[in-house]
Image (tube, rainbow, N blue to C red):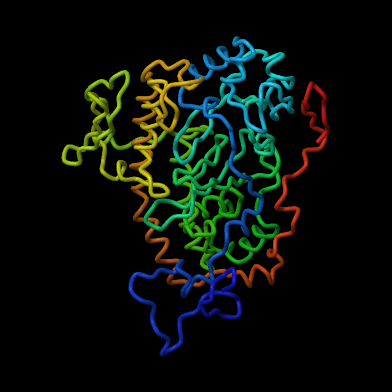
């Protein structure tokens, strides 16, 4: 089997209907099972060629849902005697209290050995932990095994990140999500999800797209589409709306019909708006008045159980109660795992000082636990809203898929003929940031 499947294709590399007498696939088989229109789908790796592996912290205590707890952990570690500091730090081959490393781009944390000069606690930064879970991270390179500096270098007010979700069957949730926060690439299924910045340089310059892709789309589809339908943000919106999960990563159909492209871009922009949750000056997601979730009974300080009562559309959090919570929000899954259950489990553990995996209190995970702060309740209400609204796009997504399966696609062969594919190797590597100084180990400076 080739990278694009084994189904019959026309001269442009697009899937064509089977000839008369060709056996039909068994019931239940879909295009992404390697039959029929699989030829017309492109790997996301071909459309957004530069990707970065997920962050690897090496120690759970450097991130979490409560920034107050992270500051308390830092202070406890910095004040500890050498032997206790070594134990609390949780050393790995990459990081110990005696490791000196370069500063994270755009951050002023120390570059000397932590054991010798920890310095002041850096302000925790907001990150996306897996799909739809906004948490916090101590941005000190001395504490993180693999922080992926190339991501920090391009993270700014213009950047968006596409995050692949682990390979999963089609009914296990979306193939990828988008965020304006720095993502850690965590996957609920335990497999890493590649991170793909939309831009290769700060300031929203040099889109991370196959060279020539925008020109090809504009030439093929520009006659009937709006001018802003061929920007980097429009391509990312299309990818969000049309991506299909597969064992080798998201696969993307490109339509040969301008109306289908425009409708998919509009849908993708709505998906982006919901997932950005009001950042970049957008409106925060809201359900209609009668459908907005409210706290009906206050949530306890240390809830241990989360239950959804479908009949009453209520989410029971210990002795607390939130409603209405539609079944669609409760059942929303990514990688086969319920998003609300994952979100709650991490905070229920943090409220009691347990590790993210529920491990007994010990080490720095237990430092700074302050029960269930009010901010988490507000975040829970917003997450319920986002998941319910995302589920509400299921109808338009099905319509888009039907239009794609009924129409012609721009196939890999056409992209090869136009010189878009294969992607040149430099497009798969980070761009240099010439003229920008960053502090290296022990205070040295490097020119990138």
Name the residue located 74 percent from the left edge and 56 percent from the top edge.
Answer: 425
Name the side, left or right, on which 231 lies relative to 331.
right
Quadrant of the rendered structure where residue 133 is? top left
Q: Nearer the viewer, residue 169 or 447?
A: 169
Quadrant of the rendered structure where residue 39 is? bottom right
Provide residue 264's location: percent of width, then percent of height. 47, 56
Name the residue located 71 percent from the left edge and 41 percent from the top edge.
Answer: 201
Provide residue 8's location: percent of width, then percent of height. 52, 80
The image shows residue 59, relative to residue 130, as above or below, that is above
The image shows residue 307, relative to residue 195, as above or below, that is above
Provide residue 187's location: percent of width, then percent of height. 48, 44
Q: Quadrant where the C terminus lies?
A: top right
Name the residue located 55 percent from the left edge and 50 percent from the top edge.
Answer: 236
Provide residue 29's location: percent of width, then percent of height. 38, 70
Q: Residue furthest left?
A: 311
Name the residue located 38 percent from the left edge and 24 percent from the top edge.
Answer: 376
């Amino acid at each position: 089997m080739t990278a694009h499947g084994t189904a019959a294709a026309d001269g442009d590399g697009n899937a064509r209907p089977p000839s008369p007498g060709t056996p039909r696939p068994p019931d239940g088989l879909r295009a992404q099972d390697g039959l029929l229109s699989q030829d017309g789908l492109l790997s996301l790796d071909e459309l957004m060629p530069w990707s970065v592996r997920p962050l690897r912290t090496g120690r759970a205590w450097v991130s979490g849902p409560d920034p107050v707890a992270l500051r308390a952990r830092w202070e406890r570690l910095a004040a500890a005697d050498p032997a206790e500091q070594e134990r609390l730090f949780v050393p790995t081959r990459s990081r110990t209290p005696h490791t000196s490393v370069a500063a994270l781009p755009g951050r002023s944390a120390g570059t000397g050995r932590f054991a010798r000069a920890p310095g002041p606690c850096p302000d925790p930064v907001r990150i996306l932990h897996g799909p739809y879970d906004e948490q916090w991270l101590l941005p000190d390179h001395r504490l993180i095994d693999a922080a992926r500096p190339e991501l920090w270098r391009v993270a700014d007010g213009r950047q968006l990140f596409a995050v692949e979700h682990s390979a999963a069957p089609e009914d296990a949730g979306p193939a990828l999500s988008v965020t304006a926060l720095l993502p850690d690439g965590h996957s609920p299924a335990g497999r890493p999800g590649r991170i793909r910045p939309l831009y290769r340089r700060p300031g929203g310059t040099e889109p991370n797209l196959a060279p020539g892709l925008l020109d090809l789309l504009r030439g093929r589809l520009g006659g009937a589409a709006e001018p802003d339908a061929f920007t980097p943000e429009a391509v990312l919106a299309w990818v969000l709306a049309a991506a299909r999960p597969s064992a080798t990563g998201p696969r993307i159909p490109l339509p040969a019909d301008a109306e289908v492209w425009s409708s998919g871009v509009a849908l993708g922009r709505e998906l982006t708006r919901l997932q950005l949750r009001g950042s970049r000056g957008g409106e925060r997601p809201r359900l209609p008045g009668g459908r907005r979730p409210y706290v009906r009974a206050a949530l306890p300080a240390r809830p241990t159980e989360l239950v959804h009562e479908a009949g009453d559309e209520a989410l029971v959090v210990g002795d607390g109660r939130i409603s209405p919570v539609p079944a669609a929000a409760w059942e929303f899954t990514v990688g086969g795992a319920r998003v609300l259950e994952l979100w709650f489990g991490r905070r229920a553990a943090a409220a009691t000082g347990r590790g993210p995996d529920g491990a007994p209190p010990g080490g720095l995970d237990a430092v700074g636990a302050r029960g269930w702060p009010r901010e988490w309740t507000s975040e829970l209400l917003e997450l319920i809203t986002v998941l319910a609204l995302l589920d509400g796009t299921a109808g338009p997504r099905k319509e888009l898929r039907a239009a794609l399966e009924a129409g012609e696609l721009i196939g890999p062969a056409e992209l090869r003929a136009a010189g878009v594919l294969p992607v040149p190797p430099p497009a798969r590597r980070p761009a240099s940031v010439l003229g920008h100084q960053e502090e290296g180990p022990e205070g040295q400076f490097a020119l990138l």
